[in-house]
Image (cartoon, rainbow, N blue to C red):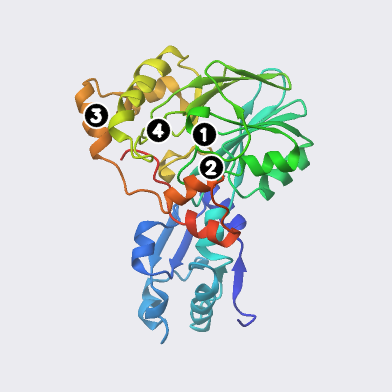
Amino acid sequence: MTESVKTISVKELARKVFNHEDVFIIDARNTDDFDDWKIEGENVQIINEPYFELLEGVDSILDKLPKDKDIYVICAKGGSSEFVAQQISEAGFTDVYSIEGGMKAWSEHLEPVKIGDLKNGGAIYQFVRIGKGCLSYLVDSNGKGAMIDTNRMLEPYESFIKEKNITLTHILDTHLHADHISGGRQLAEKTGATYYLPPKDAEEVTFNYEHIHDGDEYQVGDTTIKAVYSPGHTIGSTSFVVDDQYLLTGDILFIDSIGRPDLAGKAEDWVGDLRNTLYKRYKELADDLTVLPAHYMTIKEMNDDGSIGEKLGVLYKENHGLNITDESEFRRTVTENLPPQPNSYQEIRETNMGKISPDDEKQREMEIGPNRCAVR
């Protein structure tokens, strides 16, 4: 790579997306990969021009390139994008950047966003994994902290916790995840915090953990986290009410969709549990709770500040999955509108059970692609 090729980190690019800046991207991966999963944003313009079609030059795409904007080029891992960016630069475009680490790095970036304050001091933070749609949470109450639905990339959490001078006491997973590898147990081992998991999801796990039961309360600093059993995505799925303000729904309820019940092959068995959770159990909760899910599907669900969340009462009015009065229609909707299974989902489940221990590179490969935890 020559000096004329500039680079940009995924962290810098993510800030531009979160800030709703105009971003023009050339994705140099093959079309199938691009169609499956790409960078999205409110003001993101992205075109797919496979690398292998540009080996002889970029003349064929010059009329598609803006002359008054920065141009960002991405590929799978960051190598092909350097080549393409170099060619575009040599064609006379001055502000061309290769995105460091490609979609692999984009998939792993975590962006912390403050959701709100807690009643007795402290705050709750959402870590947005913008390239994967995963959402994890940190409850910070007067120097004590709890992590919920931790991703496997621990460094961003550790840096943030150190910066805020927080001592982690509790690490909880809402369920046994099937679309991403949980970092909860590893973070607990590193920090001395206690790791919690719903036992109905954990019958095959190979490690020790503390059980989560309906109604359990966890004191984190001066804040209370209450467990609400909410099966349907998995048989053990459990939500958490934090500070009587926030409802962490895991993969049961999203902003624009509802959870899928089939990732353990139990769609027909669990769809009734899903309906009961959404139409009865959650109905008993306060409408002004802010729903904070473990995933989001599209950038349209993102608020202006980059967060993902909405009042429960609003979702009961606007989320189609909460407004299907006929039970048989609900069952059909849920079982007939399932997206493809997440990539390597069975291996991910086995990793989260402790049955297999893939190396870091294998874990990255297992997680590549969009999240697919919701009914379409």
From the top left corner, tell me how far across and down residue 148 is, in percent. 59, 34
Q: Residue 353 carries which label?
A: 2
Q: Residue 233 carries which label?
A: 4
The circle drawn on residue 331 is 3
Task: Residue 89: tell me if it is visible.
Answer: yes
**Mark 1: secondary structure:** loop
Residue 277 image-quadrant placement: top left
Task: First in sequence, mark 3 or 1: give its number.
Answer: 1
Q: Which residue is drawn at 26% across and 40% down?
A: 337
Q: Work out whether 150 lies above or below 79.
A: above
Could you tell me which residue is drawn at 60 percent across and 58 percent down? 360
* Helix, strand or loop status at disc 4: loop
- Secondary structure state at the residue bearing disc 3: helix
What's the residue type where badge 4 is placed? His
Identify the mark nearer the N-term, 4 or 3: 4
Tell me which numbered mark, 2 or 4, is placed earlier along the sequence. Answer: 4
Residue 3 percent coordinates (x, y): 65, 80
Local crowd size for mark 3, using a 10 Å CA cut-off: few (<14), some (14–19), many (≥20): some
Q: Give how far apart the Cα atoms at labels 3 and 1 are.
A: 26 Å
Residue at mark 1: 202
Tag 2 and tag 1, C-beta contact below 8 Å = yes
**Cβ–Cβ under 8 Å for marks 4 and 3:** no
Mark closer to the observer (2, 4): 2
